[in-house]
Image: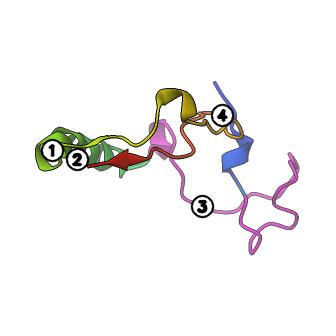
Amino acid sequence: MLLDNGAANHDATVFEDPDRFDIGRAAVPHLSFGHGARYCIGAPLARIELQVVFSQLVARFPTLRPGCAADELTFNANVLTGGLTALPVTW
């Protein structure tokens, strides 16, 4: 199990001091991705949409290429799952 507290409870209109980790903070109802009974019902649709997009991307943009060298890409180290901060492309 991984805890990514960087992705939760950051709504300043709902939480006082939202950037502070507070294990005693009162629970509030919210929507989130999850597992089991709390699994996001939109997740399967998102997967299907991404499969369609990625399968059609090359067909629609045959000259699509990276817009920079791989060593110029930067990654987001501020979140648990990482990921690119940007992916420049040209076509």
Q: Amino acid at mark 4?
A: Leu
Please give the name of the residue rendered at 69% of the width and 38% of the height, measured from the top-left corner: 4
The residue singled out by tag 3 in the image is 30
Q: Residue furthest left?
A: 59
Q: Nearer the viewer, mark 1 or mark 3?
A: 1
Sequence-first tag of 4 and 2: 2
Q: Which residues are magenta?
A: 10-39
Q: Nearer the viewer, residue 21 or 86?
A: 86
Return the residue at label 1. 56
Residue situated in front as seen by the camera: 49 or 73: 73
Horizontally, residue 46 falls left or right of residue 7, namely: left
Q: Which comes before the other along the chain, label 1 or label 3?
A: 3
* Disc 2 residue type (three-letter): Val
The image position of residue 31, as x and y in percent, is: 54, 58
Q: Residue at x 69, y 33 (%)?
A: 3
From mark 3 to mark 4, how far is it between C-alphas?
Answer: 21 Å
Label for residue 3? Answer: none
Q: Position of residue 45 (x, y in %)?
A: 28, 49
Q: Earlier in the sequence, mark 4 or mark 1?
A: 1
Where does label 2 land, which residue?
A: 53
State which mark lies toward you, 3 or 4: 4
* Image location of residue 37, percent across then percent down: 47, 42
In the rendered image, which residue does mark 4 sit on? 80
